[in-house]
Amino acid sequence: MLQMPKRAHDVMVAHCLVGMPDEACGLLSGNPDEGRVTRCHPTGNLAASAKLYTVDPKDHLRADRAAEAEGDAIIGVFHSHTHTEAYPSPTDVNQAPDPDWHYVIVSLRDTSPMVRSYRIVGGTIEEEPVVLTDR
Amino acid sequence: MSVSVNLPTVLRVHAGGTKTVEAEGATVGEALRDLEAKYPGLVGQVINDEGALHKFVNVYVNDDDVRYLSSLDTPLGPSDEISILPAVAGGAVDQSGFPGEAA
């Protein structure tokens, strides 16, 4: 399960919408043991593409330091799929950097954004529920 | 010269779970290779068989990505800090159904 404050969720979805027509991406920090997001860190997409994303390495370093300053760690990444469902593509699976991370996909295919989260371990995809919290 | 190297979580297993390790070297490449003797297996995740940086990691000296400096030849000063983070990328490119893509 991935717990996410509503505010972080809204920041994430807004970043994805603003990034249209390209894919947008960002990082999620929080407590790695509890699967609880504290903060959403929107990042640049260096790929500047509607089909690919690359988290801007400078933004990643900044987010990593900000998370650490709060006693947290980066625990996941989000990105948008602009024209497809919120399910990891083979590219997403092959390039998943950390088996402990949560992989959140925001699909903008339909009128309402669809947010889903996955664990990707050794090439195996497992969906997990996303629970929005007040804090 | 001794510098601190911050490791991402996926590489800490090679260093007994430690987040920050010390390395000796006048350049980024020397410092990273210095870690190989102390933490076998770690450097192979950062430098490929051709002796270049793996594309799926980002290495920084202080605030700067070394790909925009001199990569592994980037010189180190006494108070410099190296950070290693995974390169994070993906996308919907391989998924069928994208408008305009051939089936």
Image: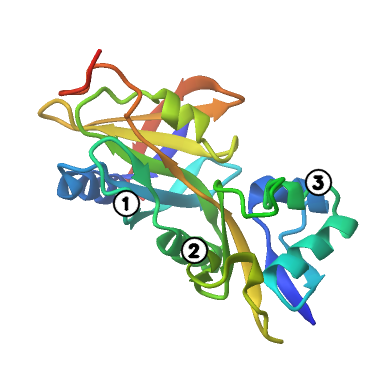
Mark 2 Cα shell of 10 Å, populated few (<14), some (14-19), many (≥20): many
CA distance for labels 2 and 1 = 14 Å
Task: Kindly tell me whether residue B15 is visible in this rendering.
Answer: yes
Q: Which residue is mark 1?
A: A45
- In the image, what residue occupies the spot 77% across and 46% down? B13
Q: Nearer the viewer, residue A98 or A13?
A: A98
Q: Which residue is mark 3?
A: B41
Question: Relative to residue B103, is residue A14 depicted above or below?
Answer: below
CA distance for labels 2 and 3 = 24 Å
Q: Chain of mark 1?
A: A
**What x and y, as percent, mark residue B92?**
32, 29
Q: Chain of mark 3?
A: B
Q: Amino acid at mark 2?
A: Leu
- In the image, what residue occupies the spot 80% across and 48% down? B14
Q: Nearer the viewer, residue A123 or B28?
A: B28
Q: Is residue A69 left or right of residue A105?
A: right
Residue furthest to the left:
A111
Mark 1 Cα shell of 10 Å, populated few (<14), some (14-19), many (≥20): many
**What x and y, as percent, mark residue B51?**
70, 54
Under circle 1, the secondary element is loop
Q: Is residue B31 left or right of residue A24?
A: right
| Quadrant of res B93 | top left
